[in-house]
Amino acid sequence: AVAKTAAAAGVRACERSLATKPIDLDPSGLFKDKGLSERYDKFRPKLPTVLVETIVNKLMGGRRPGLWLDVGCGPGNSTQQIIGYADKIVGVDISETQIEVARQKVIHPSISFTTGGCDSLPAEDASVDVITAVQAAHYFDLPAFFSEVRRVLKPGGVLALILFKSPKCTSCPILSAAHRELDTVLMGYGTTALHRYYIPNYTTITLPWEEESPVTTESHVGRHVIEHEMEVRWTMRETLDYLLSYSMTTRACEERGMTMAEWREWMREFYRERGVEGEGEETWVHTALMAAVVRSN
């Protein structure tokens, strides 16, 4: 009882002293911890096949991509979903730790991984058919990235920025409400770019070529926005593991002087204080959102 009371007091103290002002952060430092990369690999949703097939069959007009760049690939979660849809796939990430995990996990003759930034893509001019950035564009220097996209993407090629909205619990209203509140707390540890781009679902990002050639029924050129829902079943332990894969977790622990284990208990107590006692499985829905454009010239 004493331990639970202390944990509850810790929840209230952390909420009162929450850093609500976003900061600018060097993304290369976010995934130095291999444990965070491994949690990211295990608990983050995978790139839906339906979005990959939309890129190839609709936006590419059924043409098989020769070279596909997956920028900000992390531990290869999205990159491995592209296997079979392009002749050559290159995953790029600024984090050496993420690339190390990707190389150990995703082994296929069509795939390679390289460490690099969004401002220096590993491709020749006009040589790339598809560029994806999955749950990554809000960490990029977007003007530098788009400059590189214009350099390497072929006419008729596709640029697709994809994010996963915060999951929603659909089977337990109390957990759903508590999670929305906790998510707001965690977003308080996010970067300026997270608040500027990710939270508005990339609507604040203007893609190259989208204003030059608006979407019409006769053309694939312009901005395309597609959403796809995926359902998962998580225990409370798995829910907490997913939340520990947030990059904001690193900043939260550093600012609060807490270990990952202590932060896990802090979040569990946060839920308990709001009436979430069960440890069993609940249904969660992830929504993947893709904003894509086809190069017009």
Image: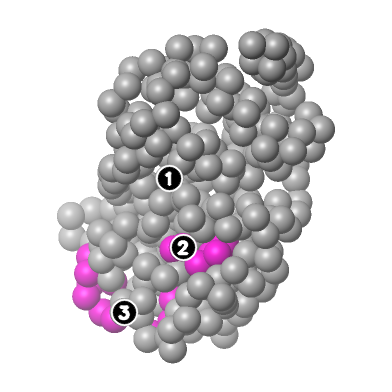
Q: Residues within 10 Å of mark 3 (few under 14, many from 20)?
A: few
Label 3 SS = loop
75 horizontally vs 258: left or right: left
| Residue type beneath disc 1 | Phe
Q: Residues within 10 Å of mark 2 (few under 14, many from 20)?
A: many
149 horizontally vs 141: left or right: left
Return the residue at label 1.
164
Q: How many marks?
A: 3
| Residue type beneath disc 2 | Asn
Q: Please tell me in which quadrant of the rendered image residue 56 appears.
A: bottom left
Q: What residue range appears in magenta? A: 57-78
| Residue type beneath disc 3 | Gly
Taking depth in this image into account, of 202 and 146 the one nearest to the observer is 202
Q: Please, is residue 129 above or below residue 278 in the view?
A: below
Give coordinates of residue 49: x percent, y percent.
28, 62
Residue 77, disc: 2
Label 2 SS = loop
Q: Please tell me in which quadrant of the rendered image residue 253 appears.
A: top right
Question: Which of the two labelled residues, at mark 1 and mark 2, occupies the earlier sequence position?
Answer: 2
Q: Residue at x 70, y 68 (%)?
A: 96
Taking depth in this image into account, of 294 and 190 the one nearest to the observer is 190
Q: Please, is residue 258 above or below residue 41 in the view?
A: above
Residue 160 forms part of the magenta stretch: no
Q: What is the CA distance from the residue labelled 1 to the residue labelled 2?
A: 13 Å
Q: Quadrant of the C terminus?
A: bottom left
Residue 84, disc: 3
Give coordinates of residue 25: x percent, y percent.
75, 45
In the image as oriented, which residue stretches furthest toward the left? 217
272 horizontally vs 24: left or right: left
Q: Please, is residue 274 above or below residue 22 in the view?
A: above
